[in-house]
Amino acid sequence: MLQELSIKNFAIIDDLRISFSEGLTILSGETGAGKSIILQAVNLLLGSRAGAAMIRSGAEAAELEALFFISPESRTAAVMASHGYDPSEGLLIRRIISITDRHRIFVNGRLATIQVLAAITESLASISGQHAHQGLLKEDQHLLTLDQFGGLTRDLLALRNEVYAGYHAMLPLIQNLHRLQTAALRQSERIDLLSFQKNEISEAHVHSGEDSELEKDRNRLKHAGMLYQAVQDSIENLYGGSGAVSERLSTIRKTMDKAAQIDPGLASFSASLADAVYRIEDIVEGLRTYLHTIETDEGRLDAVDARIDFLHKLKRKYGGSLDAVLARLTEIEKELFDIEHLSGTLEETQTALARHHVRLCQVATTLSSRRAHAAAALAQRVETELGALKMPHTRFEIALRNTPADNASDPFLTCEGKVLAEYGVDRAVFLIAPNPGEALKPLSQIASGGELSRVVLALKAILSSTDSVETVIFDEVDSGIGGGVAEVVGKKLLDLSRHHQVICITHLPQIARFGNHHFRITKNVQEGRTSTTIQALNPEDRVHELARMLGGETLTPAAWEHARELLESS
């Protein structure tokens, strides 16, 4: 139940706070006073998308806040608990709409996403305004309405959900079956291609990093003469020729040995010189060994060039690197293995699909049969409700139709010659004949605004025992109806408020008189700025407001008296 609503810097609303109670709450006021803006704010708090254009001119952000009492047994309480919220604390939703489009959502003081907000508020409130009337004209909503009606008496919602789950479980199996069947048709051609690729890679005997090693070998082979001369010259200068480095170091060492006999402090330098001579000898030995590794064979260079060129072709063909080539070999081997076992996998998939299909058809057939009974019962109930709403001769029928399967239909998505969809084989169409002698036609083709309003109200009244929402908000419920019908609508709203908290925006005093609580919404202009205010009406204020709704701003004694009579007789 909605307890508190706070709106700040939203459209023409500066700062507004409303406290709501159980029963039927009436919101009235002149056209353009801001009633629909309040409804828009509630929609945003229930998860609608926000935009900076909604912010009051001159403000940086709009702030919306609503406090709901949550019944412990409600679905909303369960969803809150699943997201880590304590429903016993109530539900406090706060939205900040920023002029920079960096909007924020808070649920019980914690930052939340729009997805979390939508999940929590899904069963919190229902708004029946122009959108609900338009929604009733969409035939895809008719089947859902029928299933909601039959949800308790014939388990339609449970069967509907089972069909939905079964249908979506079959889709990936069907996709996999088509893939396997395509693979089977191309099996021979595919095996030839994969076998060729496997042999090409396997016979190449490549290993990771081979291309880098070959590039180094090629570089050495191309510069073999320069490398040989450089090493040979280094050996000669270090050790072989007259005045070589090793010879000169030996001479210096002998001189240092004699000096160390005079001053032992020079002995360490003499030892270091001896070590240097040995190290040079080691270097020279290493260089001599390296000389034997230098190849000048032109045939070897040609072989390396050819191998590098071959590896480049493999890399271009199989992924760009030798690691990718080796990975492709693994993939090919796996695919060949799968193809070898394709027939078994195909048979297993067909068996699983057949099993799912049989069960899904059974549930869909049961669902369709129970829908037929529920459709007749709902149609009769709607006729009764519309009769009470001053449409006594209206005939209402729910036609269940299906789409016949054809050659293009997937056999696993058909049932007894009918196309099987995610909610079964049925499509529901609401048919209505408001006047005697008229033929039944789809609701979308002939219903007027007033008739649609009453059909919406009739369905809400019928579904009140199965609808899980606790708060129902009506906007434009009085669209297209007159005073006599309005009184009946008002009584129906009052009856509905025994099951739900009902909030109704209306222009008709014949409806407003039945409210347990009444607020007047007014628009004022102060210092060149327009703002909306709201006032809770006491009994005398209600007489004044009903008189205004009856006769306009010029309140006559007759309007006052009529308004008082309306309240006293409600």
Image: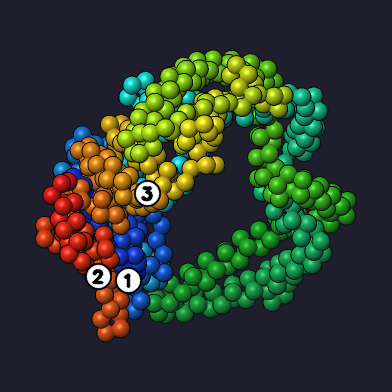
Contact (Cβ within 8 Å) of mark 1 with mark 3:
no
For the question of whether residue 21 can be seen, the reply is no
Question: What residue would you read off at disc 1?
Answer: 12
- Determine the secondary structure under disc 3: loop
User: Height in image: 429 above or below 527?
Assistant: above
x and y, in percent, of residue 319 in the image: 70, 47
Badge 3 density bin: few <14, some 14–19, many ≥20, Cα 10 Å:
some
Badge 1 density bin: few <14, some 14–19, many ≥20, Cα 10 Å:
many
Q: Amino acid at mark 3?
A: Ile
Marks 1, 2: nearer the viewer? 2
Q: Amino acid at mark 2?
A: Thr
Count of marks overlaid on the render: 3
Question: What residue would you read off at disc 3?
Answer: 481
- The disc, 1 or 3, on the residue closer to the chain's N-terminal end is 1
- Determine the secondary structure under disc 1: loop
- The disc, 2 or 3, on the residue closer to the chain's N-terminal end is 3
User: Height in image: 123 above or below 556?
Assistant: above
Q: Which mark is residue 211?
A: none
For the question of whether residue 26 can be seen, the reply is yes
The picture quadrant where one finds residue 242 is: bottom right
x and y, in percent, of residue 449 in the image: 44, 48
Nearest the viewer among 137 and 224 is 137
The residues bearing labels 1 and 3 have C-alpha atoms spaced at a distance of: 29 Å
Q: Amino acid at mark 1?
A: Ile
Q: Is residue 195 left or right of residue 326?
A: right
Question: What residue would you read off at disc 2?
Answer: 554
The picture quadrant where one finds residue 82 is: top left
The residues bearing labels 1 and 2 have C-alpha atoms spaced at a distance of: 26 Å
Q: Residue at x 39, y 45 (%)?
A: 453
Badge 2 density bin: few <14, some 14–19, many ≥20, Cα 10 Å:
few
Q: Residue at x 21, y 34 (%)?
A: 73
